[in-house]
Image: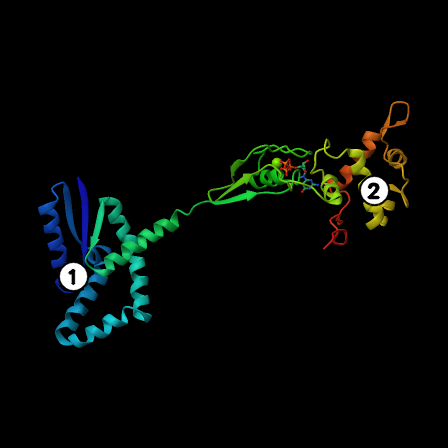
Amino acid sequence: MKKILIFYASYGGGHLSAAKSIENVINTNYKDTQTKLIDCMKYVNKGVEKLTTAAYRQMAKKAPWAWGHIYSASQKGILAHISTRSNKIMAVKLLKLLKEEKPDLVISTHPFGSQMCSYLKRKQKGMLPRKARVLVVGIPNAGKSTLINRLVGKKAVNTGNKPGITKELNWIRINNDIELLDSPGILWPKLDEKNVAFNLASLTAIKEEVLPLYDVAEYILNTLLKYYPGILEKRYKLTELDEDIIVNLEHIGKLRGCLIKGGEIDYEKALSVVINDLKDGSIKGITFDRYDEYEL
Ligand SMILES: Nc1nc2c(ncn2[C@@H]2O[C@H](COP(=O)(O)OP(=O)(O)OP(=O)(O)O)[C@@H](O)[C@H]2O)c(=O)[nH]1
Ligand SMILES: [Mg+2]
């Protein structure tokens, strides 16, 4: 059984007559339906309905010529604004009726009823907005997953200090309004420029198997010497670099206590000192991504 509400308003008898005719046609031709006639203005606000229908009757009786003016004025401008605003306010009451009656279909023979229904339809769409879905994208090991965990306030996704920790896409709900998509780090399909590859490797965005850590540490030290000699001196007490990376790492290893049993230098540890100083932010406010290194 389908339920149909037919809204009308008592501004003159025409809207009610039209509503009754529609009801008649439905009841005669569609057996499996139930119809209900409702004065929508009376339902939403008896006071406003009484006042406006009385005003309408007086005008129709004493100044019928004024109706044309009011009708045109109600289509745009201040009157239209007032009417739209008041219909929006009254529509909230109409929603109660719609929730109680749960009609399959609403027909309205008066524009106020149509306006209130269309407002409710739009508002309902607005009340159920789609969640904002945000893709977190960037080079490997940049901190995408860490950012997501920080925003959610718990360890929702895996993180780790090497590229390739996130291997697939994961949707993470932050709250009722936002969902984040964690994604594996992406890189250019081909790293043509050597310095671009080394810059990425310096940020540990490229796997060790691709560029050996010794080469990366050497690149970092050379780049610091070239652009930030003050930092190289302050951090590693080096004003120049030896051509042999082992000599430089020996110096840094001694300075930072990277030793194995017997006082030998732990070169692996020394080079991870250089890489981690850059990665963990101990060396701040620098960039390897130099404008002057690119051919334009
Ligand atoms: N110093 C510093 N380290 C950070 C920051 N954010 C993340 N990290 C560290 O960077 C490393 C990589 O973090 P992840 O969040 O796993 O990076 P990711 O971008 O998700 O990496 P993939 O999933 O491998 O692409 C971890 O060791 C983090 O602790 C930050 O703001 N500052
Ligand atoms: Mg990740």
Residue 99 in the image: state x and y as whole percent: 26, 45
57 relative position to 195: left or right: left
Residue 28 in the image: state x and y as whole percent: 8, 47
Q: Is residue 32 visible to us here? A: yes
Instruction: Give the mark nearest the N terminus, 2 or 1.
Output: 1
Nearest to viewer (mark 2 / mark 1): 2
Label 1 element class: loop
Q: Which residue is painted at 46% across and 42% down in the image?
A: 176
Amino acid type for the residue under numbered disc 1: Ser
Look at the numbered discs 2 and 1 and tell me whether their residues touch, using CB distance below 8 Å.
no
266 relative position to 153: left or right: right
Q: How is the image coloured?
A: rainbow
Q: Residue furthest top?
A: 261
User: Badge 1, how many Cα within 10 Å: few under 14, some, many 20+?
Assistant: many
Q: Which residue is painted at 53% across and 44% down in the image?
A: 134
- Choose between 222 and 129: the one closer to the eye: 222
Mark 2 lies on residue: 221
Label 2 element class: helix
Q: Which image quarter is the C terminus in?
A: bottom right
Q: Is residue 75 above or below residue 229?
A: below
Q: Is residue 280 visible to us here? A: no
Amino acid type for the residue under numbered disc 2: Leu
Q: Is residue 228 above or below residue 253?
A: below
- Choose between 238 and 150: the one closer to the eye: 238
User: Badge 2, how many Cα within 10 Å: few under 14, some, many 20+?
Assistant: many
Q: Which residue is painted at 57% across and 35% down in the image?
A: 154
Q: Is mark 1 within 8 Å of ligand 2?
A: no
Which image quadrant for residue 20? Answer: bottom left
Mark 1 lies on residue: 10
Residue 294 in the image: state x and y as whole percent: 74, 52
Q: Distance of mark 2 from mark 1, alpha carbons? A: 86 Å
